[in-house]
């Protein structure tokens, strides 16, 4: 599945951004979707995932409540709303799609362990 991430940019601490993940050749509502991020010198980590079965969402981050994943099926787009951003949120953000069944927690784990078809991502920089 070819995905395109967009919406990144420079934002001040405490600000918000909404990232978008789109696909041109498939319907994303048929897929479990995950957002991951990778900061310089750090491993890629999961940010938020949404199940294709029950629509549940899950964030593996300790303060994951600041991140909300959602679908707009009419636009074939999955969003990541990010609020109260901090400098430590600075990273390249990637989305992933998989034909995975299960809860959002389960698909997050599967993406973390096995997914390797990463795209270009979108840069988010949080700085004064």
Image: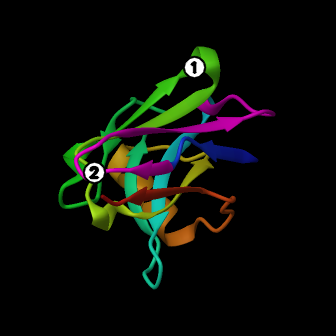
- Residue 73 is tagged as 1
Which comes before the other along the chain, label 1 or label 2? Answer: 1
User: Farthest bottom residue?
Assistant: 41
Q: Is residue 46 within the magenta segment?
A: no
In the displayed structure image, the side of residue 54 where residue 30 appears, left or right: right
- Percent across and percent down for residue 40 are 47, 79
User: Farthest top residue?
Assistant: 74
Find the magenta span and give its range.
9-28
Label 1 crowding class (10 Å Cα cut-off): few <14, some 14-19, many 20+? few
- Percent across and percent down for residue 127 are 34, 60
Q: Is residue 16 within the magenta segment?
A: yes
Q: Is residue 111 visible?
A: yes
Report the residue at 18% width, 61% height from top.
Answer: 62
Q: Name the residue under label 2.
A: 85
Quarter holding the C terminus is: bottom left
Report the residue at 41% width, 46% height from top.
Answer: 49
- Percent across and percent down for residue 94 are 55, 56
- Percent across and percent down for residue 120 are 68, 59
In the displayed structure image, the side of residue 27 where residue 81 appears, left or right: left
């Amino acid at each position: 599945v070819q995905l395109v991430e967009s919406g990144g940019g420079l934002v001040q601490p405490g600000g918000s951004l909404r990232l978008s993940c789109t696909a041109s050749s498939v319907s994303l509502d048929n897929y479990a979707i995950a957002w991951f991020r990778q900061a310089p010198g750090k491993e890629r980590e999961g940010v938020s995932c949404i199940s294709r079965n029950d629509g549940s969402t899950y964030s593996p981050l300790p303060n994951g409540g600041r991140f909300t994943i959602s679908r707009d099926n009419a636009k074939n787009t999955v969003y990541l709303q990010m609020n109260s951003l901090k400098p430590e949120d600075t990273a390249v953000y990637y989305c992933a799609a998989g034909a995975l069944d299960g809860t959002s927690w389960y698909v997050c784990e599967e993406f973390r362990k096995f997914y390797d078809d990463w795209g270009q991502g979108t840069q988010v920089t949080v700085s004064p």
